Image (tube, rainbow, N blue to C red):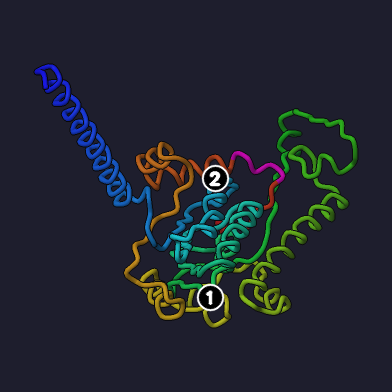
Amino acid sequence: MSLESDLLLDRRRLKRRLLFWRGATVLAVLVCALVALGKTGLIAGSHVARLEVTGTIGEDHKLNEAVEALAKDDSVKALIVSVNSPGGSVSGGESLHGAIAKVAAAKPVVTVMGGMAASAGYMIAVPAARIFARESTLTGSIGVLLETGELSGLLGKLGVSADAITSGPLKDQPSFTKPMSAEGRAVLHGLVMDMYDQFVEMVAAGRHMDPARVRELADGRAYTGRQALKLGLIDAIGGETDARAWLAAEKQVPASLPVEDVKPGGLAGRTLGASLGPMFQDLLKTVLFQGVRLDGGLAVWQPVVSGQ
């Protein structure tokens, strides 16, 4: 065999070895990447999901979609709904309640209440199989309000008048520039009571209570956790540790499983949210919500403090 033939064969062997080691290197990098992603939670193994709801509750389509997706995620063995909220819009509470209910139909869901879980904050708690609260938690406040203001007296003193051309007598009800008519008040009260009936139905279904009994408790007042326990609005006094113990004992969800927070949006959005901090996010959510309250019913606990 000639020298050139030997060199050619050696070169081919070297190329095959090089191809093998390149493939092995790529495979090793992929394995390391998968391990790293698993540790960071981007590729999750079996775990318990935690949904934290703080501040004012409004419409959040991305959050609702992320919650609904938990129902079909086999890696999620249970959901903990952690609530610390005075409530919010009726539609916001209704949509999140619906998303949580879909998860509850597929796997165990427990609610853990913080300092406050009132009105719409209570609405989103009731799909859970078990509700935990602190003795001092403020919860309940089952009801709906629709607030408005009327400035015609002040405008008259300032010499300012306002007029509106409407397609019907109820189109400008309520109005900041004239008193509410009796007919307008009756129609708006009907809207509030219809939303109230929907709220009562959610509580009755979630808590397996007679709607008549719910109505007895649903006069808008808030209850402490200790009072709510006696009334059947919650199931136990405790926190997340107690919730995990109950899941392990009653639903066979191991207490050793890690907990991962539900975070809607892509990686960039999650990173930005983490950097902003919870306090700023709550402030931003509240400001945005207050700016879009037009014609919206509220399910929120807001004690009125009056001075002499």
Mark nearer the viewer, 1 or 2: 2
Sequence-wise, the earlier of marks 1 and 2 is 2
The correct choice, above or below, for 293 with respect to 68 in the image is: above
Describe residue 63's horizontal placement relative to residue 27 as left or right: right
Question: 153 or 192: which is nearer to us?
Answer: 192
Describe residue 217's horizontal placement relative to residue 230 as left or right: right
What's the amino acid at mark 1? Answer: Ile
Q: Give the residue drawn at x 26%, y 36%.
A: 23
> Dot 1 lies on which element?
loop
Find the distance from the CA under tag 1 to the CA under tag 2.
28 Å
The label shown at residue 99 is none
Describe residue 28's horizontal placement relative to residue 214 as left or right: left
Q: Which residue is mark 1?
A: 234
Q: Where on the picture, by quarter, is residue 170? A: top right
| Quadrant (top left/top right/bottom left/bottom right) for the C terminus | bottom right
Q: Where on the picture, by quarter, is residue 5? A: top left
> Dot 2 lies on which element?
helix
Res 308 visible: no
| Quadrant (top left/top right/bottom left/bottom right) for the N terminus | top left
The magenta-colored residue range is 291-295
Q: Give the residue drawn at x 60%, y 63%.
A: 101
Describe residue 224's horizontal placement relative to residue 291 as left or right: left
Query: Which is the main secondary structure of the residues drawn in magenta?
Result: loop
Q: Which residue is mark 2?
A: 62
Q: Give the residue drawn at x 65%, y 75%.
A: 217
